[in-house]
Image (cartoon, grey):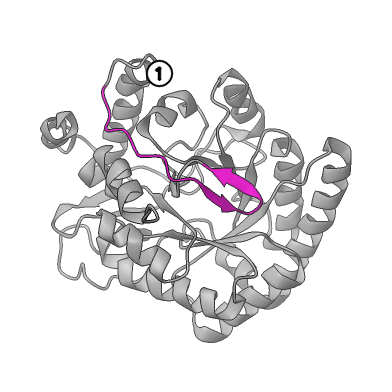
Amino acid sequence: MLYALARPLLFLLDPERAHELTLGLADAPLRLGLLRVPRAPGAPVQAMGLQFPNAVGLAAGLDKNAAHVDALSRLGFGFIEVGTVTPRPQAGNPRPRLFRLPKARALINRMGFNNVGLDVFMQNLSRASWRGVLGINIGKNADTPIERAADDYAACLERVYARASYVAVNVSSPNTKNLRDLQDNRNLDALLQRLAALREQLAQRHGRRVPLALKVAPDLHAVQVQGIADAVRRHGVDGVIATNTSLARDGVEGLPEATQAGGLSGAPIRARATATLAALAGALKGEATLIGVGGIQRGADAAAKLAAGASLVQLYTGLIYRGPGLVAECVASVRPSR
């Protein structure tokens, strides 16, 4: 109810400024329990060798710098994913770079992995007291050539390994030049081979095996889906996050801001993202955990992701339009019947 009252005022602001303001203003009250949020019912899920309190998580991108983990943990998520973090800090693309399409309950962003870099990111995490299931989403710096991208991912994996419950390898943002080339067979095979080998070394060093999840685009054709599934299986990747934002503009044609460059998220990509999820489920046949993301605006949308093959789901754009109450609604919708 409180968010429903505040949203019209927030929507008067620039979207990125509203995002920063909301996190900043809510941080202390949420951490201290002063803001009442609908409680999500318990519904534990076992996936990727981890125990999740419930199947509904926060997608990467909302807390890029891991600066609000304790506050966000109060919203009832079963897990939180932070990032994307890159080895070195970078400003991302020029502003404005985030656009609302309210009539479609959608966003377009071309943020470009803006983040504080590994050093500050890990300092932020060191101050967080929450010890729930934490995913850390990693990427490459914009000025790192694609042929050296694996160096950036390896540097990130090594640094975040001790703190992460799982590590998400983001090869699908449309806002870093040529990044999606890493989804192609040869590039993906080389990247996952490097990370899988490094993961084995880190598992020996730290005494635990941290799951790896690959985040993919919704704009994949059937051959690409099969190639990704084969690479995931070959290199022992534990999960696939389906999906990132879309370059397509189906469902937003003619709306203000619809022609902005960047990735589209929210209700218009629901069907596309779920179709990609279902295709991956068919190709993987249960050999990796699937996390369904894209277009979840109500509990029924989350349930549809599970019906398509996901074990877990994540929210982001839906939170912008529905507020924190969406979390408990989705948990209730995906909770197994007793």
Residue 44: say if magenta. Answer: yes
Q: Quadrant of residue 164?
A: top right
Q: Position of residue 76 (x, y in %)?
A: 38, 35
In the image, what residue occupies the spot 31% across and 57% down? Answer: 296
In the image, what residue occupies the spot 59% across and 50% down? Answer: 142
Residue 71: say if magenta. Answer: no
Q: Main secondary structure of the magenta part?
A: loop
Q: Nearer the viewer, residue 192 or 175?
A: 192
User: Can residue 228 be seen at all in this image of the molecule?
Assistant: yes
User: Can residue 247 be seen at all in this image of the molecule?
Assistant: no
Q: Nearer the viewer, residue 6 or 332?
A: 332
For the N terminus, the quadrant is top left
Range of magenta residues: 36-52
In the image, what residue occupies the spot 31% across and 48% down? Answer: 332
| Amino acid beneath label 1 | Arg
In the image, what residue occupies the spot 61% across and 34% down? Answer: 117
